[in-house]
Image (cartoon, rainbow, N blue to C red):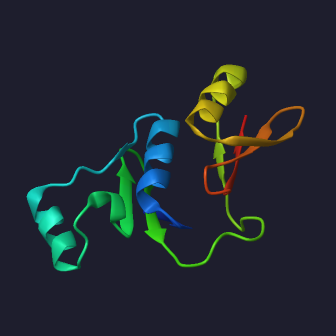
């Protein structure tokens, strides 16, 4: 039986989107860069982790991978994350402060977009 291991998000700038989601989700953080990882990046011509084409956010299950793709998001996601919070209003304010945009308000949930326009829900 298969188990969900990673969720992979295509994006324009993996480092900044990874930081957004690491801050948005309880218990998650951008995976640290040790010297071996920095050397691997340098061998691929990447001198600054800010330019890393694939950034891992870990701390829970599933892990989140952010990978650079050349095209911008154009239409609605085919997959989105649903977040839960004890205090939806406070969490909505916090997420907007991190760079999310409120798209829709419903009776029991709201729809937001992350800094690159990927929709997600909060209830």
Which residue is more in the foreground, 110 or 71? 71
At 54% across and 79% down in the image, what residue appears? 70
In the image as oriented, which residue stretches furthest toward the right? 107
Residue 99 makes an appearance in the image:
yes
User: Would residue 77 be found to the left or right of residue 34 on screen?
Assistant: right
Q: Quadrant of residue 79?
A: bottom right
The relative height of residue 35 versus residue 84 in the rendered view (above or below) is below
Residue 36 horizontal/vertical position (percent): 10, 64
Position of residue 41 measured from the top left corner of the image (x, y, whole percent)? 21, 70
Q: Is residue 105 above or below residue 36?
A: above
Which quadrant holds the C terminus?
A: top right
> Horizontal and vertical percent for residue 68?
47, 71
Left or right, 26 with reference to 54:
right
Q: Nearer the viewer, residue 24 or 51?
A: 51
Q: Is residue 2 visible?
A: no
In percent of the image, x 65 and y 42: which residue is there? 100
* Residue 24 coordinates in the image, percent (x, y): 52, 38
In the rendered view, does 43 fall on the left or right side of 31? Answer: left
Q: Residue at x 68, y 56 (%)?
A: 117
Please report the residue visible at 50 percent of the width from the left and 46 percent of the height from the top: 21
Q: Is residue 76 above or below residue 31?
A: below
What is the count of numbered marks?
0
């Amino acid at each position: 039986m298969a188990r969900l291991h990673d969720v992979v998000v295509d994006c324009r700038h993996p480092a900044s989107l990874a930081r957004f989601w690491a801050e948005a989700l309880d218990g998650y953080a951008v995976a640290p860069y040790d010297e071996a990882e920095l050397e691997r990046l340098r061998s691929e011509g990447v001198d600054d982790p800010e330019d890393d084409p694939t950034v891992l956010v870990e701390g829970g299950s599933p892990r989140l991978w952010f990978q650079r793709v050349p095209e911008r998001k154009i239409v609605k996601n085919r997959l989105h994350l649903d977040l839960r919070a004890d205090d939806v209003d406070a969490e909505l304010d916090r997420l907007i402060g991190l760079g999310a945009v409120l798209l829709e308000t419903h009776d029991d949930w709201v729809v937001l977009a992350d800094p690159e326009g990927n929709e997600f829900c909060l209830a």
